[in-house]
Image (cartoon, rainbow, N blue to C red):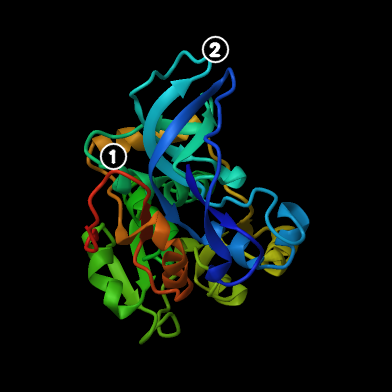
Amino acid sequence: MKAVECTRYGAPEVLKLIEIEIPKPKADELLIRVYATAVNSGDVRIRKADPWAVRLFFGFKRPKNPILGGVFSGEVVAVGRNVQTYKIGDTIFGTTGMTFGTYAEYITVKETGTIARRPDSLNHTEAAVIPFGAMTALHFMRKAEIQPGQKILIYGASGAIGSAAVQLAKYYGAEVTAVCSGSNMELMRKIGADKVLNYQQEGLSLNQEKYDVVYETVNKLSFRESRKHVKKGGTVVLGAADFSKMLRAGITGLFGQKILTGVAKESGAEMKWMKELIDEGKFVPVIDRAFSLEELVEAHRYVDLGHKKGNVAVQVVGEPRNESFLR
């Protein structure tokens, strides 16, 4: 099968198309033919070893699992002898988390993994982009205990996590203020934001409003600014914090300020809940562009620019190309 390997840490050119053996599922695993995956910030950080501490956990010279990619949508083509929930022919979407591996034509996943049946309303490309942003945003929304009528500010609202956070906050009944670039303001309104601020113009400096929750999704708003805009007793979510911000958050939290950070937890139950939300028409994928597996270097270059709207999809096999997925 075809796969893309991260040969060392560095620029997108370290990604190389290779041929490897199709994996065999263990007794509790499914073999999935991958139709689509995506390029997310987690993949990019591992590829770059940014921050440097990535090397301590994932491999010093290159990732221990050199095939990156953490999300997928595909079809079950074989099952282990103990599998009961899924059968050959089922279409599945989900995430492999920190084990990665989805930049390939086939993967194995545990039956109890962070997976669910693909919503009928979505094709594989649309389904594949959902798990990363949705699982991350859902984790922090639930920890923040967002309530109907509360005001939430989402900084970096047009990215994969931000666009998911906007939709989930609206589902929970919050009043959403989205912060993004001018070119993405209409998109934010389309997916449900009540107010939209253009950080390239007024930013937050002239905005004196206080919020019950401030959700910083891209690690570009300073720690001080994030705290400045939250109400007394409110919650700051640092969803993409580096180590220094995590340390400051931990110290600040000792003095009563509620600050959430760290790695999002994922589960199959939450993926199934997201499927139900999609089936009810209350969550839609946001896709900027789609590339083929052979174009993965170009896809990573595009994400490196830092201007993507929502998600960048990678069509591995099976579906027609389309450069205007944004919806």
Q: Name the residue: 77% across, 60% down.
A: 60
Query: Which kind of residue does numbered mark 2 sit on?
Result: Asn
Between circles 1 and 2, the one closer to the viewer is 2
From the viewer's perspective, tell me whether residue 187 is left or right of residue 301. left
Residue bearing mark 1: 278
Inter-mark Cα distance, 1 to 2 = 30 Å
Q: Is residue 152 visible?
A: no
Instruction: Kindly state the secondary structure of the residue where label 1 is placed.
Output: helix
Q: Residue at x 44, y 48 (%)?
A: 146
Q: Tell me the residue at 26%/57% (across/down).
A: 192
Quarter placement of the C terminus: bottom left
Residue 14 lies in what quarter of the image? bottom right
Please determine whether, in this image, residue 258 is positioned above or below residue 74: below
Q: Position of residue 10 (x, y in %)?
A: 62, 70
Q: Nearer the viewer, residue 163 or 67?
A: 67
Sequence-first disc among 1 and 2: 2
The answer to whether 126 appears left or right of 112 in the picture is left
Q: Is residue 199 left or right of residue 13?
A: left
Tell me the residue at 37%/48% (across/down). Answer: 316
Q: Which residue is mark 2?
A: 82
| Whole-percent x, y for residue 297 in the image | 47, 66
Between 117 and 275, which is closer to the camera in this rendering? 117
**Which of the two residues, 310 or 126, is positioned nearer the viewer here?**
126
Q: Is residue 111 above or below residue 250?
A: above
> Which amino acid, mark 1?
Ile
> Measured along the vertical axis of the image, is residue 53 above or below residue 111?
below
